[in-house]
Amino acid sequence: MRDSIRKAARQHGFAAAYFLAPLPLPLWRERASLSRTQCGMDWDVPAAYPGATCVVLLVEAYLPYRRADDNRPRADAPEDRILPYYIAEHRAYFEAKALAAEIAAQGFYCETARLPARALALENGVGAHSNNGLLAVGEFGTRAALFTLATNACGPLPEAGEHPACEEGCGACARACPAGAISAAELDATKCLRYYMDGAAHPPFVLEKLTSFLGCDLCQRVCPKNAHLKAQPLPEEIRAAFDPRRLILGDTAKARALSGRNVTGGGKLTLEAIALAARDGLHESEIRAALASPHPAVRDAAKWALEKYF
Ligand code: SF4
Ligand code: SF4
């Protein structure tokens, strides 16, 4: 059955599938409670999924976007500000659900599982911890969105693959992080910009330091574990959907459809576009118009931008 799941996973666009033992993760729980990053995930995997003999880890690998104009100042180009992670993750979410339904249709128990995939993978010897807090998986580096299925269709398979560890003394991610969230050995999740970007409203220090829409990947861009990944051109459809002027004017439907409506409510993309544009001194009149937005977080960001930059 594992071969058949691997094959089906590839057909759904996943780059790899690993077969993990459903283990409890008490250490992860302790750390997650301290940093308040539990986010409703099930740490006691066997208790939460008693019917599971295996957790299938699905790897959605993605590539960074290649900059069209390398002479532009860093972080000015749309290729730096639109993160392929969110688009890949949104696509794969539906594919993981469809794959679970296919396995269940063959008479097995199978459901998508909300559990700490990185911690469970490491506990099973899959992937390597990275100082930026991410899991490096084989040839995909840290550029992978992870999904998990709880199932009784098969058992776990011990993993013998090679996963890249951090080079001693590297520290590139710590030097690149605009929030000072990474120390020599690990990430302090409570300092990462992404920690404050779940809801629509972003605190002023995030508006000031934000590097991209919906999150930040500076620590991945500089990471040698990803240096071999070949950048892809930014598709025109995505470039147009995330055009900052368009987003500031409130036309966010296409960008939300690409990155997921559930993570982009409350005018989030509009206020992020306001912050990025204001810092470049662009789109003042559109930002003034955003003072009349129906979303309080957008009005607050427009006020912040006008006071600080215009
Ligand atoms: S995502 Fe950005 S803010 Fe968070 S740790 Fe990485 S570089 Fe720092
Ligand atoms: S940049 Fe260096 S220290 Fe940071 S995660 Fe990558 S390899 Fe590890």
Image (cartoon, helix red, strand yellow):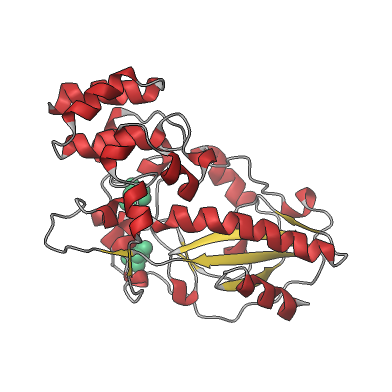
Q: Is residue 218 left or right of residue 215?
A: left
From this view, report whether residue 221 is shown above or below residue 251.
below
Residue 152 lies in quadrant? bottom right
Toward the viewer: 283 or 275? 283
Q: Quadrant of ligand 2?
A: bottom left
Residue plotted at (62% across, 77% down): 159
Q: Position of residue 51 (x, y in %)?
A: 84, 57
Residue 262 lies in quadrant? top right
Q: Position of residue 246 (x, y in %)?
A: 31, 39
Q: Is residue 159 left or right of residue 217?
A: right
Regarding residue 136, the answer to whether it shows in the image is yes
Circle count: 0
Residue plotted at (14% across, 28% down): 309
Task: Report the quarter where the C terminus lies.
Answer: top left
Toward the viewer: 228 or 78? 78
Q: Is residue 223 left or right of residue 135?
A: left
Task: Report the quarter where the N terminus lies.
Answer: bottom right
From this view, report whether residue 82 is shown above or below residue 221.
above
Q: Position of residue 79 (x, y in %)?
A: 28, 57
